[in-house]
Amino acid sequence: MNLIVVDEKEVDLTYIMLKKEAESGGYFLNPDPEFTKNLVRGLMKNEKRYGYRACPCRLASGKKDEDLDIICPCNYRDPDLNDFGACYCALYVNEAVAGGKKQSEPVPERRPPRSERGKKRPMPTGSAFPASTLAFPVWRCTVCGYLCAREQPPEICPVCKAKKERFERFI
Amino acid sequence: MNLIVVDEKEVDLTYIMLKKEAESGGYFLNPDPEFTKNLVRGLMKNEKRYGYRACPCRLASGKKDEDLDIICPCNYRDPDLNDFGACYCALYVNEAVAGGKKQSEPVPERRPPRSERGKKRPMPTGSAFPASTLAFPVWRCTVCGYLCAREQPPEICPVCKAKKERFERFI
Amino acid sequence: MNLIVVDEKEVDLTYIMLKKEAESGGYFLNPDPEFTKNLVRGLMKNEKRYGYRACPCRLASGKKDEDLDIICPCNYRDPDLNDFGACYCALYVNEAVAGGKKQSEPVPERRPPRSERGKKRPMPTGSAFPASTLAFPVWRCTVCGYLCAREQPPEICPVCKAKKERFERFI
């Protein structure tokens, strides 16, 4: 596995881009640059290995459909930031941890077991929710919860930069 | 028409600003700088001519009310990015085209014929949608689908930078 | 009160950061740098005094719970930008005022009297609004109206950078 080599200049560049993207959306990278660049290196290796940036701290299946929820930023980042001050890898931390005012807590694995993964939530149905009265469907980013109303989801989530495949129909 | 002259330094500056704005919202300008600057030049000429940045590849009426849907970014950009990888002008492209991995396809005109334009969609009404139980009306950006709940739409869409007049009541 | 001193280099840095943050979300700071830096100085003094950036033009109680609505950006900024072209302090202005094309108008105090403050709006209830059919609760930023659907509100509003405590349940 370690034979996959990534260019160190690209690691630095990717680190800078992720940091900028994070901050523009109200997120923070881990304040320890060496620790963080090591995670970035892992992301880039996974990108070469699988074709997508699977979480560097979890075992990916290599099948994109099964791994969608752990493509970084993963679907569990935001609840983990809320409950523990950091994501599972501690690549992302909350403001208090970023500013050195708090330490993040150990983060338990929140990902459901394999048998429960990848199930699409059923759409709200029945006369209870009159989605048909809305002019457009409402889409939800499964990573950050961003909502928008349009024919199709956006190419890239404007808030967390997750790709279109991470959106689900919400209403 | 060609007598309208724009300052080339301003073209460069506007190009840089549009590129930055696009990327902060998850959009991409065409990767060919000369092609793109030519479109920017067209936008700036239209701004001088009409007072707003009408699409450089369509014939504007000069009446802002009738042209709202083709003020750049136009209401058709996002569906066209989704279906063809580029907007009608190819000023905006999707990530694959921006990165040189794909070529955009020819984009047919999606704008409705004149007789069907500018009609405001009727608000959802009736007991089917209980908007009255919400604390604020929900507004939708007609360009990018951004949703927000407040007394009035924002001055500028935080995602795509469209102006207030491009918002419609959604709920 | 004036014994609270803030470092002038930090004022300059905070001014630059606020300006950048404002523009990335479609907002504008007052175009007069000296006037604006004076307000930034007031915000920083309030941060030292109370622990949060209470509005520099209003009298804070010093109890965060009672002052949430006037932590800058205050809950009244966006309606005031809409109606008068500036917030109560004129720290934030709309695009026309920022570009020198208009002057802002005097802004009356929109904050409700003390007896009516801090009341949480009751959640929409009853069979009229079938929130229970949605997969996630919908949260609303009380500052800018941003909506998202997730277990808990985000740490920081991606649009206006208000903190989690400024969110309310919307659906």
Image (cartoon, coloured by chain):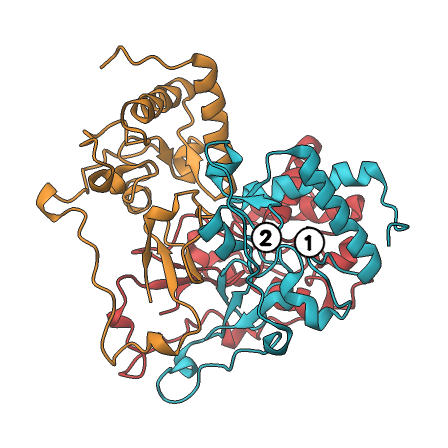
Chain colours: A red, B orange, C cyan
**Residue nearest the viewer, comparing A138 with C79:** C79
Residue B62: quadrant of the picture: top left
Picture layout, residue B60 above or below residue B38: below
Q: CA distance from mark 2 to mark 1?
A: 8 Å
Picture layout, residue C36 above or below residue A138: above
Picture layout, residue C50 above or below residue A29: below
Chain letter of the residue carrying label 2:
C
Q: Amino acid at mark 1?
A: Cys
Residue B139: quadrant of the picture: bottom left
Q: Circle 1 sits on which residue?
A: C57
Total number of numbered discs in the rendering: 2
For the residue labelled by badge 2, is the local secondary structure a helix, a strand or a loop?
loop
Other-residue count near label 1 (Cα within 10 Å), few / some / many at <14 / 14–19 / ≥20: some
Please report the residue visible at 67 percent of the width from the left and 64 percent of the height from the top.
Answer: A81
**Residue nearest the viewer, comparing A37 with B133:** B133
Chain letter of the residue carrying label 1:
C
Q: Is residue C138 left or right of residue B49?
A: right
Other-residue count near label 2 (Cα within 10 Å), few / some / many at <14 / 14–19 / ≥20: many
Q: Is residue C162 left or right of residue A129?
A: right
Q: Is residue C71 left or right of residue B73?
A: right
Could you say where residue B79 lies in the image, as x and y percent from the top left?
A: 29, 47
- Quadrant location of the N terminus of chain C in the rendered image: bottom right
Q: Amino acid at mark 2?
A: Tyr
- Is the Cβ of the residue at disc 2 closer than 8 Å to that at disc 1? yes
Q: Circle 2 sits on which residue?
A: C88
Task: State whether discs 2 and 1 lie on one chain.
Answer: yes
Could you say where residue A118 lies in the image, as x and y percent from the top left?
A: 47, 69
